[in-house]
Image (cartoon, rainbow, N blue to C red):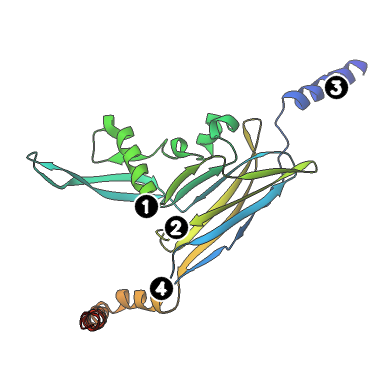
Amino acid sequence: MRYTTLLAGIIGLFLLLWGPKALAMVTCEVSPNYIPIHFFYNGAELKISGHADQVCDYVVIIKDEAEKLTLRRKGKVKGLFWMNVGEITFEPVPKVFMVFSNKPLDEILDKSEQEQYDIGYAALFHEVHVEGVPQSEREKWIKEFIKFKENLKLYREKFNAIKVEKEGSGSRYLFDMHWPYQAVPGVYTATVYAIQNDRVIGTCTKVIRVEKVGLLKKITQLAFEKPALYGIISIVIAIIAGVGVGLVFGSKGKH
């Protein structure tokens, strides 16, 4: 009996010291979580905040569903003219992928955890298939793809962007960002990862909806449902706009 009790105590101590860490309770709020696109739309200011019941580091990832994406590849023909010389396909990749953290990823999160949760550029593209170029150039074209997306403000990897404060036995986080107008309407997720001792110990996910509204939405629907009528209306609007500009500059030229 005494030996059984001693053995149980040793096992308990082992689990306490080397066993899995307790999971953290993490909360998250996104404000606003609905972004309407109208004629004067130029993106939106987002605020993401929350807390965990343990002192943690934090990573926030904003993305949509990964899909197959095909891009045209340009090159010189006969060494003179830049033309489309083929297509490159990347699969699976999200249209939007943004990573924010309070410290550089490699300082707070193990590489295996980054790959498991698709955190960071390197992890995201760990299993992406690239077609249309030699596989020996895969890494090169993935880097070019990231640059292309970054120029559109759709991909971002920014460290030291999240403010973290100790709060009792836990911690609170807060960060602001500008939602790019280049992001198409759709459903996006914002996932917060609480990190401790190089491991993810808790997560929280919220949905962000981006949608065309009002007249812009009706025009878009018209383009799909009645393309011929949409074309006529577009021509009329262009003519009216051209006449209006001509009258404004014509009247200025007379003075």
Disc 1 residue type? Leu
Q: Which mark is residue 180?
A: 2
Q: Which mark is residue 152?
A: 1
Instruction: Give the left or right position of residue 25, taking residue 101 as reference.
Output: right
What's the residue at 27%, 49% (across, down)?
A: 71
What's the residue at 38%, 39% (across, down)?
A: 128
- The picture places residue 104, in percent across and down from the top left corner, at 55, 34
Image quarter of the C terminus: bottom left
Instruction: Identify the mark nearer the N-term, 1 or 3.
Output: 3
Instruction: Identify the mark nearer the N-term, 3 or 2.
Output: 3
Q: Which residue is mark 3?
A: 9
Instruction: Give the left or right position of residue 184, taking residue 130 as reference.
Output: right
Instruction: Identify the mark nearer the N-term, 4 or 3.
Output: 3
Number of dots carrying numbers: 4
Could you tell me which secondary element the residue under label 3 belongs to?
helix
Q: Which residue is mark 4?
A: 39
Disc 2 residue type? Pro
Q: CA distance from mark 1 to mark 4?
A: 20 Å
Instruction: Identify the mark nearer the N-term, 1 or 4.
Output: 4
Disc 3 residue type? Gly
Instruction: Give the left or right position of residue 56, taking residue 231 as reference.
Output: right
Instruction: Identify the mark nearer the N-term, 2 or 4.
Output: 4
Front disc: 3 or 2? 2
Q: Is there a contact, CB below 8 Å, between mark 2 and mark 4?
A: no
Q: CA distance from mark 2 to mark 4?
A: 15 Å
- The picture places residue 137, in percent across and down from the top left corner, at 27, 32
Q: CA distance from mark 3 to mark 2?
A: 56 Å
Residue in the foreground of this view, choosing between 149 and 64: 149
Q: Is there a contact, CB below 8 Å, between mark 1 and mark 2?
A: yes
Mark 1 surroundings: few (<14), some (14-19) or many (≥20) residues within 10 A: some
Front disc: 4 or 3? 4
